[in-house]
Amino acid sequence: MSQTILTEYGKVIISEEAVSIVAGVAALECYGLVGMCSRSRIRDGFIELLKKENLSRGVEVRIKGGSVIIDLFVIVGYGTKISEVAQNIMEKVKYVVETTVGMPVEHVNVNVQGVRVNDGK
């Protein structure tokens, strides 16, 4: 489902995929986040890190009544406080989506799917 905004010059249609890409890019800028993972690839303990061109697969967006609900599926770095990383992601994604897209964000849910140990590279 998409959101249509009427202006004096015409209408703007914002798709859920556009919102998910904005949310994914905003989340990747947060400290402690290693990457996004696909919600459909979580089987048998195998989690695939997504590259930047596939960010929307790690974000689920629902637009209801003009507001947005965002679910993020993330992998955090070992040694970081998961609750702090998740809180920072929530605040950053909410702010960026509201200012970029212009739609109110009702909820940002962070689903931590794994912890990745930094291999020193």
Image (spheres, grey):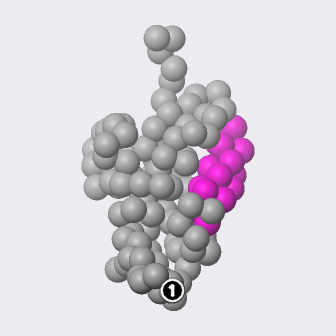
Within-10-Å neighbours for mark 1: few <14, some 14–19, many 20+: few
Front residue (pair 87, 105): 105
Instruction: Evaluate whether residue 101 shows in this view.
Output: yes
Left or right of 87: which side holds 54?
A: left
Q: Mark 1: which secondary structure?
A: loop
In this rendering, is residue 74 above or below 76? below
Question: In this view of the protein, which residue sits in the foreground, 2 or 57?
Answer: 2
Residue 117 image position (x, y, % from top left): 51, 24
Q: Nearer the viewer, residue 27 or 36?
A: 27
Most distant residue in the front direction: 9
Is residue 82 placed above or below 119 in the rendered structure? below
Residue visible at 52% across and 72% down? 69
Quadrant (top left, top right, bottom left, bottom right) of the N terminus: bottom left
Q: Measured along the vertical axis of the image, is residue 50 above or below residue 40?
A: above
42 left or right of 103 in image? left
Q: Residue at x 58, y 70 (%)?
A: 102
Q: Report the residue at 34% width, 37% height from top.
A: 51
Q: Which residues are magenta?
A: 81-98
Q: Main secondary structure of the magenta part?
A: helix
Asked if residue 118 is among those painted magenta in the image, a careful observer would answer no
Residue 42 visible, this angle: no
50 to the left or right of 80: left
- Answer left or right for 2 relative to 84: left
In the figure, residue 40 lies in which quadrant?
bottom left
In the depicted view, which residue is nearer to us: 51 or 33? 51
Give x and y (percent) for residue 42: 32, 49
- Residue that badge 1 annotates: 8
Report the amino acid beneath label 1.
Answer: Glu
